[in-house]
Image (cartoon, rainbow, N blue to C red):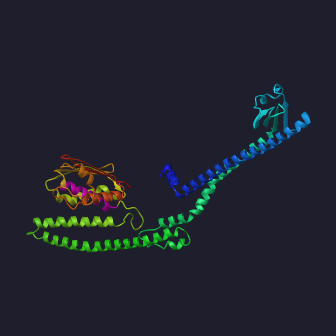
């Protein structure tokens, strides 16, 4: 498994999804809260300054009528100007173009920020400027603190989310570990007892019910394969023993019925062996070592066993390289035996067997197959043409090849023959 596969598995994991969802939720909430605090601060500041400026303008209007120029405030935070309409040149440049009546606007002059309101007092232009430089500095600091706090919260969301997801998903991970440790050959344990009080207890109880049914299926399959192995092989052994006795009698040794019986019994024995092998899990030997076999030896033995079926057909073996296959001998016997039998039964006059570079191929010069036949060739029970068997040959080949990860390649054209290649996994 490469790094990209590991990364993909982590990105697809439930823990990552929970962590990402939680981190995204925290980031969105932090952003919304920061924006809301910004908006609330702006609104409160604006309302506060509007109230202060309006109050100062009202006082200026009242006191200026009684005290004149002495009523003009000139403190560190408030400045006021009252000039004749033609005396605007005496004012700071930013104030000269303001309208005659305005409740307040933000301006900057003399390197300071002001909230400025305008009005008319006794026919004169009046300007009141409230210094908001310190307020804006505190507001800028407030914004910076909010942004930094939001960034810290978002940065902590990922590790905290991972920790929360790990704690929250711990029962699910424990259940997954228990399920992964289950073995078909070992009776299942009661999972629900380990998760009493957790929400995953419902899933554990469902698994318990499923495993109980599965244990029943496994036990029935085990009993069937054991019984079938004995009950089917015994009568076949009796038939084959009787055949050997009859073949020793000169009167019946070469009779056609006896030959057909001998051939049918041998094919039945091979079919039973194949089906029993596929029904059992024989991936490892009893000592835990992966079984293997010499492919060239198995191919030679199968060819020798099928020579009586050749008749007038020619069997060519141009290459038979040494090859050790990571699979038991019976697996290769099933694959090659069925391929060779199909070629002898449905092929033309010549059958060509090759084992080279880890590829076992069986080719014939028969009628070949059309597109529809190619699509169904490996399906169970598919039969075509005269002399078709039970439709299990290529199906068994496909089953064994899939079990041991042997790629199959089937090429055929009408009237040009058929070629099937099996790429064996060498040990």
Q: Main secondary structure of the magenta part?
A: helix
* The image quarter in which residue 48 lies: top right
Image quadrant in which the C terminus is located:
bottom left
What residue is rendered at 22% in x and 60% in y? Answer: 305
What residue is rendered at 56% in x and 57% in y? Answer: 18
Residue 74 visible from this viewpoint:
no
Extreme-left residue of the structure: 251
Instruction: Look at the picture and state if 75 lies above or below 269.
Output: above
Looking at the rendering, the stretch of residues picked out in magenta corresponds to 328-345
Left or right of 171? Residue 322 is left
**Residue 266 percent location from the top left of the image:** 21, 65
* The image quarter in which residue 426 lies: bottom left
* The image quarter in which residue 252 lies: bottom left
Count of numbered tags:
0
Left or right of 260? Residue 398 is right
Given residues 305 and 87, the one toward you in this image is 87
Left or right of 265? Residue 161 is right
């Amino acid at each position: 498994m490469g790094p990209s596969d590991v990364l993909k598995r982590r990105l697809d994991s439930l823990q990552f999804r929970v962590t990402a969802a939680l981190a995204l939720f925290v980031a969105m909430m932090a952003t919304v809260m920061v924006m809301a605090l910004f908006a609330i601060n702006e609104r409160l500041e604006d309302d506060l300054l509007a109230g202060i400026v309006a109050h100062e303008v009202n006082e200026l209007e009242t006191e200026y009528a009684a005290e004149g120029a002495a009523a003009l405030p000139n403190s560190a935070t408030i400045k006021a100007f009252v000039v004749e309409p033609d005396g605007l040149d005496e004012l700071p440049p930013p104030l000269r173009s303001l309208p005659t009546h305005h409740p307040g606007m933000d301006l900057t002059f003399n390197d300071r920020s002001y909230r400025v309101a305008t009005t008319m007092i006794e026919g004169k232009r009046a300007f009141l400027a409230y210094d908001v430089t310190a307020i804006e500095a505190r507001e800028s600091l407030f914004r910076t603190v909010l942004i930094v706090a939001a960034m810290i919260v978002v940065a902590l969301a990922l590790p905290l989310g991972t920790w929360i997801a790990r704690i929250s998903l711990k029962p699910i991970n424990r259940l997954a570990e228990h399920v992964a440790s289950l073995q078909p050959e070992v009776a299942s344990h009661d999972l629900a007892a380990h998760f009493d009080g957790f929400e995953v207890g419902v899933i554990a109880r469902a698994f318990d019910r499923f495993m109980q049914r599965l244990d029943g299926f496994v036990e029935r399959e085990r009993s069937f394969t054991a019984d079938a192995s004995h009950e089917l092989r015994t009568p076949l052994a009796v038939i084959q023993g009787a055949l050997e006795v009859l073949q020793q009698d000169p009167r019946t040794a070469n009779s056609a019925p006896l030959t057909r019986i001998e051939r049918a019994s041998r094919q039945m024995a091979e079919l039973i062996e194949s089906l029993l092998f596929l029904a059992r899990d024989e991936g490892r030997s009893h000592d835990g070592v992966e079984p293997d076999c010499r492919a060239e030896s198995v191919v030679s033995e199968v060819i020798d066993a099928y020579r009586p079926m050749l008749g007038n057909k020619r069997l060519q073996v141009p290459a038979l390289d040494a090859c050790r296959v990571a699979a038991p001998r019976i697996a290769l016997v099933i694959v090659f035996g069925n391929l060779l039998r199909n070629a002898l039964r449905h092929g033309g006059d010549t059958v060509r067997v090759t084992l080279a570079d880890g590829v076992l191929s069986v080719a014939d010069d028969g009628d070949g197959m059309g597109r529809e036949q190619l699509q169904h060739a490996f399906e169970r029970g598919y039969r075509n043409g005269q002399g078709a068997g039970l439709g299990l040959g290529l199906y068994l080949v496909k089953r064994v090849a899939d079990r041991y990860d042997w790629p199959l390649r089937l090429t055929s054209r009408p009237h040009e023959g058929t070629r099937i290649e099996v790429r064996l996994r060498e040990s």
